[in-house]
Image (tube, rainbow, N blue to C red):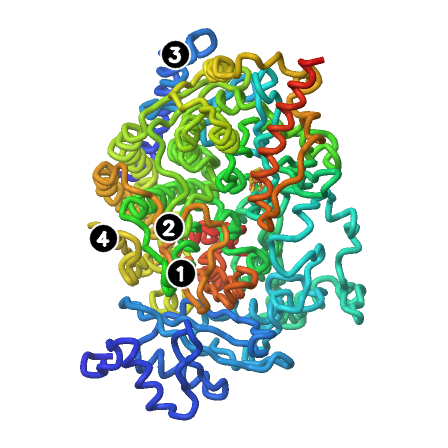
């Protein structure tokens, strides 16, 4: 791959790339002409070829998101939507493949971008779209005996009430009742007619169960070169202290060595996206808090950006004020520090340093959460961002008045508190953590060279965030496709080159230091914009009219790229709900690389490798 | 040298250890007996070492904006004009903006004319479902629903105890002022008065002036203002209404037909005014007897 091979198409604009595609595939690539939509619609028969061209000739090497939309009642087809990026930066090339609803099938792109693996399984699970050529197409979030595909528009959940909120039964004649009273628990689940519970059980021990899981364990093949060694299948989790939630890894072991590993997830699945499509636009904001519950502020921001992307095509849209943007950046960078403290602390837990490092790290987190609580009203479920602004301005004072017995009151000036926090306390704590762990021989010998992820694989698996950057790819959405006031701010994209656990630890320290650097620049901007409005619209509007179209809002979350794909079909008089609300969860997609990273390592390392990805199940399972 | 990294790390641990004790000694005693402000420093931004609050013996007061399951604001029991009256006009906005749809409101209705009146007949919040998002308080146009600070809601029975009804939800305005003085002041400033938006309008219509907003953090002061401003010939509040902070005023039944208005909000506001007038009439009648 030398320079002369880098055709102009590799670096050209999206328009050039689309023109290139249309010239190459004149009959199969068409502009998406629907109002409010962008990108191209690709004939599904040529999908794989188009994808290859995109990757190899046009330089779109990074597939960020692949998701489905059910257009029942609109145009009655299913659609796969792909967002491809260049790791050198720039906007997305959006391409779509359409299929009919019955027997929906689209070719799998797993050979082009292996990172699409779990996303295609999710689309199969939730939408019932088959992916021809996917080697392991089975449910991923729902359980095996589940009936139907819940994200289809005609599927209704157990406590179904109405298609859209707000429900009519709440006002003006809202006599409270519990959903369980109408639909008793246990009777609210439907099973497929042909479900044979016996077939889900395994009599002959592991064999049928794990063959069913696609692991293909063949007991007779366990004899190697005359020495009889047993290969063991072990479940790590779902209840296991190091899985950071309810998460299971099925590992095949030869002695202590991992031969293969497959994550099993979905234990915390609550159909977040379906809830999101019943909700009105604003309703979803507090629900995003519950995705990556360590970083609710940045989840909020991603969703706000996505919906603002839709609102921006409307006539009355005014972008958020500078102060609002400065506060947003303040919040999300503090969140990054919170998250990385947490990630490092718990990585050390996974390495066996039980809770001392974790507690030192999260003690600092408390100070940040105190500030969140005083500003947004909650420590973790912040629900702070709004479309076109934030919910409330920073308070003058971080102040508590006693209202319960034994209360200890507090009262600080907010800006003093922040200044002290950002200029003194956090840098000191980061240095402290650095001194504490970086040189420790135990940490080094447990992490250096373990869980190696080569850069080309990191891209192919669509990994994001610290995981990608620790493998030598300096890809950061804040720089690649800047949003908010990041273009004004001076910071570097942290990058490390060894791609092992140690580098993933170091890069989190680097990123925290960069965050502090950003925060130091935000503080004077806050002082300067004092008194400016924090909201650029009519704050009383609780059912905003969202113009028809699609938007993809993505932010550099602490755990990686968090994207929201939203579609609005709303007619101005009808219900104001998202037609499609999809979350591109970094924790979920980063797990695609877990199996490859663990191969050949010991069981104890699996736990550390998982810890170094830094997942949170609220977001993985959604 | 091999092992230096570990030793360095141990140095950090031992420093944390000593810092914690040093702070404890600095604040010894005062933690338990001293003024509350001492604790403020101990929990401040420059504290070192490990700091622990011995919950439930000790609690950190939550900041003003802290949000937990909402409550309904009602007038205080010794309000001079309308004791215990709901601030809620049952407009329904909170129930619409509530993301998990856990607010259930029965809009008040005139028994004779069947027109909506601006008082909720019933108001429920299913606290099991409430996600403490704060939207209801944020979007209520009448400052009538507020996020509470009382987070200790554990109970033995979830099926009934956790659906809060109107009586349980209602808390006096002075309580709201005591937990969130800054916010209460900001809202009163925006309304231009310490009184309910509708009362301000009513009084304007009646040619009286409502109590203008003057900054204060003391609910007693607000009450004193209200009392000083109450019409002099007005008798003491009716004992029936004063007995409970949540009981809807009995005079509601005497409500006159509201104006022809399709808009429920408008109807609500009109009816509220009618209700207030009717209450005054009833009060006069009583004093005349
Ligand atoms: S929004 Fe306020 S006034 Fe309207 S029903 Fe809710 S609490 Fe009552
Ligand atoms: S806080 Fe949120 S969830 Fe709870 S009642 Fe209010 S709007 Fe509903």
- Residue bearing mark 1: A311
A602 vs B49: above or below: below
Quadrant (top left/top right/bottom left/bottom right) for the N terminus of chain B:
top left
Callout 2: chain: A
Residue at position x 72%, y 36% from top?
Answer: B158
Residue ID for mark 2: A537
Q: Position of residue A400 (x, y in %)?
A: 43, 23
Indicate which label's residue lies in the foreground, 4 or 1. Answer: 1
The image position of residue B35, as x and y in percent, is 42, 9
The one of A408 and A120 positioned closer to us in this rendering: A408
Q: Where residue A463 appears, x then y in whole percent?
A: 41, 62
Residue pointed to by mark 4: A492
Marks 2 and 1 sit apart, C-alpha to C-alpha, by 11 Å
Mark 3, residue position: B27
Q: Which mark is first along the chain, 1 or 2?
A: 1
Q: Are marks 4 and 1 in contact (CB under 8 Å)?
A: no
Mark pair 4, 2: CA separation:
33 Å
Identified at 32% across, 59% down, the residue is A477
Q: Confirm whether circles 4 and 3 share one chain.
A: no
């Amino acid at each position: 791959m030398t320079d002369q091979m880098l055709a102009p198409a590799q670096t050209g604009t999206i328009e050039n790339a689309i023109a290139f595609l249309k010239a190459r595939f004149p009959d199969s690539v068409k502009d998406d002409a629907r109002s409010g939509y962008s990108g191209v619609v690709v004939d599904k028969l040529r999908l794989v070829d188009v994808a290859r061209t995109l990757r190899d000739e046009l330089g779109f090497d990074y597939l960020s998101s692949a998701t489905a939309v059910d257009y029942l009642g609109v145009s009655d087809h299913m659609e796969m939507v792909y967002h491809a990026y260049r790791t050198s930066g720039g906007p997305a090339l959006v391409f779509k493949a359409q299929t009919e609803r019955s027997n929906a099938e689209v070719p799998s792109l797993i050979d082009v971008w292996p990172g699409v693996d779990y996303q295609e399984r999710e689309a199969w699970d939730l939408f019932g779209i088959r992916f021809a050529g996917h080697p392991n197409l089975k449910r991923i979030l729902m359980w095996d005996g589940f009936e139907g595909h819940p994200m289809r528009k005609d599927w209704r959940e157990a406590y179904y009430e109405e298609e859209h909120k707000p429900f009519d039964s709440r006002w003006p004649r809202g006599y409270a009742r519990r959903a369980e009273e109408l639909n008793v628990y246990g009777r609210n689940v439907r099973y497929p007619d042909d479900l044979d519970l016996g077939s889900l059980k395994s009599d002959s021990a592991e064999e049928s169960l794990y063959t069913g899981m696609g692991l293909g364990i063949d007991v007779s093949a366990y004899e190697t070169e005359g020495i009889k060694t047993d290969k063991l299948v072990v479940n790590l989790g779902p209840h296991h202290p190091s899985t950071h939630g309810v998460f299971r890894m099925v590992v095949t072991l030869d002695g202590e060595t991992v031969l293969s590993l497959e994550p099993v997830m979905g234990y915390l699945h609550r159909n977040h996206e379906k809830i999101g499509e019943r909700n009105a636009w604003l309703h979803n904001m507090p629900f995003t808090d519950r995705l990556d519950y360590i970083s609710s502020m940045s989840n909020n921001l991603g969703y706000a950006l996505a919906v603002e992307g839709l609102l921006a095509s409307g006539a009355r849209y005014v972008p958020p004020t500078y102060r609002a943007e400065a506060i947003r950046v303040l919040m999300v960078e503090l969140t990054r520090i919170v998250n990385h403290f947490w990630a490092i602390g718990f990585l050390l837990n996974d390495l066996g340093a039980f809770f001392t490092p974790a507690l030192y790290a999260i003690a600092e987190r408390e100070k940040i959460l105190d500030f969140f609580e005083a500003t947004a009203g909650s420590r973790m479920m912040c629900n702070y961002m709004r479309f076109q602004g934030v919910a409330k301005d920073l308070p003058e004072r971080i102040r508590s008045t006693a209202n319960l017995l034994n209360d200890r009151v507090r009262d600080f000036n907010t800006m003093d508190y922040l200044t002290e926090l950002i200029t003194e306390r956090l840098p000191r704590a980061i240095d402290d953590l650095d001194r504490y762990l970086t040189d420790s021989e135990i940490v080094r010998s447990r992490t250096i060279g373990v869980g190696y992820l080569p850069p080309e694989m990191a891209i192919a698996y669509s990994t994001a965030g610290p995981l990608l950057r620790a493998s030598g790819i300096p890809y950061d959405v804040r720089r690649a496709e800047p949003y908010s006031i990041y273009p004004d701010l001076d910071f570097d994209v942290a990058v490390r080159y060894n791609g092992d656990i140690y580098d993933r630890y170091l890069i989190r320290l680097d990123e925290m230091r960069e965050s502090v650097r950003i925060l130091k620049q935000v503080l004077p901007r806050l002082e300067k914009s004092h008194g400016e409005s924090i909201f650029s619209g009519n704050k009383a509007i609780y059912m905003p009219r969202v113009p028809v179209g699609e938007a993809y809002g993505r932010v550099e979350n602490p755990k990686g790229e968090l994207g929201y794909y939203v579609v609005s079909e709303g007619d101005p008089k009808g219900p104001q709900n998202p037609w499609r609300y999809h979350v591109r969860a970094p924790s979920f997609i980063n797990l695609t690389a877990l199996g490859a990273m663990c191969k050949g390592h010991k069981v104890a390392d699996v736990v550390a490798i998982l810890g170094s990805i830094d997942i949170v199940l609220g977001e993985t399972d959604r | 040298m091999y092992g230096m990294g570990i030793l360095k790390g141990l140095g950090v641990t031992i420093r944390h250890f000593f810092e914690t004790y040093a702070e404890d000694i600095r604040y010894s005693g005062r933690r338990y007996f001293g003024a509350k402000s001492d604790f403020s420093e101990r929990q401040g931004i420059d504290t070192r070492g490990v700091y622990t609050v011995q919950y439930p013996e000790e609690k950190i007061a939550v900041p003003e904006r802290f949000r937990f399951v909402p409550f309904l604001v009602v007038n205080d029991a010794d309000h001079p004009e309308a004791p215990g009256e709901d601030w809620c006009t049952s407009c329904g906005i909170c129930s619409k903006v509530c993301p998990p749809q856990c607010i259930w409101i029965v809009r008040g209705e005139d028994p004779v004319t069947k027109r909506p009146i601006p008082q909720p007949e019933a108001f429920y919040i299913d606290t099991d479902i409430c996600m403490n998002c704060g939207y209801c308080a944020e979007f209520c146009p009448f400052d009538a629903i507020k996020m509470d600070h009382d987070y200790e809601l554990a109970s033995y029975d979830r099926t009934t105890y956790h659906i809060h009804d109107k009586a349980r939800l209602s808390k006096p305005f002075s309580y709201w002022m005591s937990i969130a003085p800054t916010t209460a002041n900001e809202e009163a400033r925006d309304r231009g008065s310490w009184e309910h938006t509708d009362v301000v309008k009513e009084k304007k219509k009646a040619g009286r002036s409502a109590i203008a907003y003057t900054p204060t953090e003391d609910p007693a002061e607000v009450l004193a203002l209200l009392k000083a401003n109450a019409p002099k010939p007005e008798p003491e509040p009716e004992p029936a209404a004063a007995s409970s902070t949540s009981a809807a005023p009995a005079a509601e039944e005497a409500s006159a037909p509201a104006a022809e208005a399709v808009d429920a909000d408008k109807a609500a506001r009109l009816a509220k005014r009618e209700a207030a007038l009717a209450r005054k009439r009833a009060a006069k009648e009583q004093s005349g007897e």
